[in-house]
Amino acid sequence: MRNIGKQISDARRKQNLSIKDLSERTKIRTHIIEAIEAENYSVMPEVYMNSFLKTLATTLKIDISTAEVVKESKSTPKHETPKTQTPEIKGKEFVAPTPKPHVSKDVADFAEIFKKKNIKRRDKKIIYNYALISILAIIVIAAIYFTITSLYGNGVSRSNTDFLQNADTAVVSDEKPSSLFSYFDKADSLVLTAKAKDSAWIRLLIDGKQIIEILMRPGNEESWAASKYFILDQGNAGAIQFYRNNQLLPSFGKPGTVVKNIKITMSEIINPMEFKDTTLTRKAVRKKAPDTIEKKPRLIEESKINTDKNIFNREEGNESPQ
């Protein structure tokens, strides 16, 4: 069966469909449908033309076999005649010229559309890839930033904790809250430095807000910063040298004693202990009265015997009447 284009045109008219209506149903462009109905199959490549013919036949319910569609799409249009060229002669052999493929304007437009779509798809993929890489880079940078912040912003170093042999010993942990480092950036901050010559514990109240408890050993050195003042408690006075803004401070008590409530400000040091002996293990000394009274031997006194005879006479007189 031939004349498939005419069959498609007749079926369309019987169903009262315009070329635009058929184009909306089949998603085939109107100028391609018009070319098919005119049996001009050269507007599209053979592969696309076969697909369009099958789609139109299915939509219009035309019984056309695949072989007929292929044969029809391969047929030469009636209104076009292939141009022939005279063969070139090279010596004694005849060489037929290579025919140039005919590309219609519609085919060129269709190919250009495909190129533009491919370019758009390629651009979308590139943009998507760049966006994905940017998001991953931001996530990695944020993870590194938060890791460094957690290590240096909230890190706490812990040292060994032991008991001192004195009665005023306290067991404390060696902690360095890194939030204090922010004070060092201020020009008017109060910096207290401790250098240990012997083992001693420290309890430090900073600006009435934060408490530091630390056990220092010989050779240890620590620094803290405050905006107003420090309140210091220390065991084993004299074992630690304190520096206020790099200036050495005098000892706060007698060596080996416990000192408490030492207030250190930018301009003064208030020491309520006044170098009193605060050792907690003192033993009370019993007071003894001086032994000034001389002990003398006790003398035996003579006993006095009453020898009055009247006593005996009275006793005899009392017994006679009986």
Image (cartoon, rainbow, N blue to C red):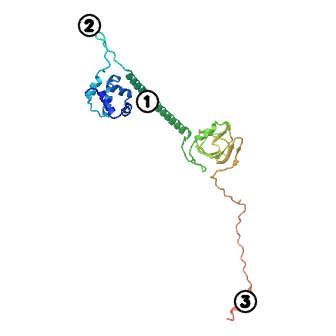
The disc label shown at residue 160, or none: none
Which part of the image, by quadrant, shows the C terminus?
bottom right
Q: Is residue 71 visible?
A: yes
| Viewport quadrant of the N terminus | top left
- How packed is label 2: few (under 14 Cα within 10 Å), some, or many (20 or more)? few
At label 2, the amino acid type is Glu
Q: From the top left corner, tell me how far across and down residue 103 is, in percent.
A: 36, 19
Kind of residue at disc 3: Arg
Q: Earlier in the sequence, mark 2 or mark 3?
A: 2
| The image quarter in which residue 90 lies | top left
Q: Secondary structure at mark 1?
A: helix
Mark found first going from the N terminus, 3 or 1: 1
Along the line of sight, which residue is nearer the eye, 13 or 296? 13
Residue 217 seen in the current view: no
**Disc 3 element:** helix
Asked whether 101 or 56 is in front, the reply is 56
Which residue is label 2 attached to? 93
Res. 251 image quadrant: top right
Vertical relation: 48 (above or below) 184: above
Name the N-terminal-most of marks 2 and 1: 2
- CA distance separating discs 2 and 1: 54 Å
Q: Which residue is mark 1?
A: 125
Instruction: Identify the residue shown where x is 33% and y is 27%.
Output: 37
Residue 201 x/y as whole percent: 60, 45
Label 3: which residue?
314
Circles 2 and 1 in contact, beta carbons < 8 Å: no
Mark 2 lies on a secondary structure that is strand
**Front residue of this view, candidates 168 and 194:** 194
Q: Nearer the viewer, mark 2 or mark 1?
A: 2
As drawn, 6 above or below 173: above
Q: Amino acid at mark 1?
A: Lys
- Return the x and y of residue 161 as percentages of the image width and height: 54, 45
